[in-house]
Image: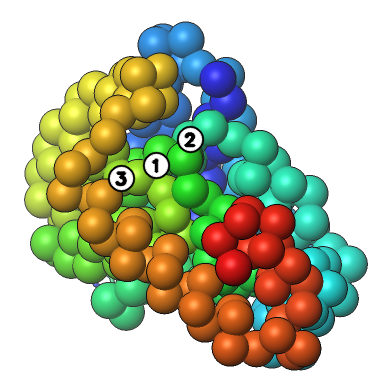
Amino acid sequence: MKIMAICASPRGAQSQTLRLVRAVARGAAEAGAEVETVDVCKLKIRYCTACGVCHAKGACVHHDDFADLYRRILTADGLIVGSPNYLQSITGQLKILLDRMSSAIHCQLLAGKYFCAVGTAGGPGYTEVTDYLTTLLMSFGASSVGSVGAAVAIPNAIDIAEGDAVVLGQDLVEAIRVQRVYADQVPIHAERRAFFRQLVQHHPEEWAYECTFWQEQGEA
Ligand SMILES: Cc1cc2nc3c(=O)[nH]c(=O)nc-3n(C[C@H](O)[C@H](O)[C@H](O)COP(=O)(O)O)c2cc1C
């Protein structure tokens, strides 16, 4: 079982988000998963220019660190995705990565994977990060196992969250192992899948690669 942990704080070893991401990863590793942790801020990933080539041909025009990370995301069974709150959202570095994955949302390529969202903020706004990531990654087709976060200005908050994070990582592995079905997420996944399949079908020439993908799924 492979789990990819992605942290999107530019503060490297000083990052409190990294501390929580590592704690989730530790729990997952203790439960038997092979976990790889990536600092997305250390990678060279150019921003999406909306050229549409990924939708038409299945590959991005940019030649940078994205392709290798994307391949590893797509072959992982589980994801741990963490960001600090920057102006009520995720950091720009993580947003750029996610923008580059828009063909994966069209084709629901995270379906069958499980994830945990991790957030930190100066105050209670870490839920702005975890709520955003949870909604978004579910739109890619993945199942949410849960989230963890902390307001770093509150004494001991990060220490308490660190303990919760280890337990969450263990549960991530269990969810993957038993292929847990979250009944409340089933209709959301069905609606998102139908929405993106139909969206792609409305662009048969412009998004030829994705149209063929859905045909090969037997859903077009
Ligand atoms: C550019 C910037 C914007 C920020 N915006 C917010 C914000 O909107 N709300 C908030 O609660 N904290 C905000 N913060 C504080 C960070 O979210 C907080 O310090 C976080 O825990 C840092 O995580 P890190 O240690 O992983 O880098 C901001 C910090 C920076 C540098």
Q: Tag 2's secondary structure?
A: strand
First of labels 1, 2 by sequence position: 2
Is 156 on the left-hand or right-hand side of 49? left
In the rendered image, which residue does mark 2 sit on?
Answer: 78
Residue 64, image x and y in percent? 84, 64
Given the image, on which type of amino acid does mark 1 rest? Phe
Residue 70, image x and y in percent? 69, 52
Q: Quadrant of the N terminus?
A: top right
In the rendered image, which residue does mark 1 sit on?
Answer: 115
| Label 1–label 2 contact, CB within 8 A | yes
Given the image, on which type of amino acid does mark 3 rest? Ser
Q: Quadrant of the C terminus?
A: bottom right
First of labels 3, 1 by sequence position: 1
How far, Cα to Cα, is label 3 from label 2?
10 Å
Q: Quadrant of residue 4?
A: top right
Residue 162, image x and y in percent? 25, 31
Is 2 on the left-hand or right-hand side of 56? left
In the rendered image, which residue does mark 3 sit on?
Answer: 144
Residue under the image location 17 percent in, 54 percent down:
151
**Ligand 1 image position (quadrant):** bottom left
Label 2 neighbourhood size at 10 Å, few (<14), some (14-19), many (20+)? many
| Label 3–label 1 contact, CB within 8 A | yes
Given the image, on which type of amino acid does mark 2 rest? Gly
Residue under the image location 48 percent in, 73 percent down:
196
Picture layout, residue 1 above or below residue 61:
above
Residue under the image location 47 percent in, 60 percent down:
140
Q: Is there any visible trace of residue 152 in the rendered image?
A: no
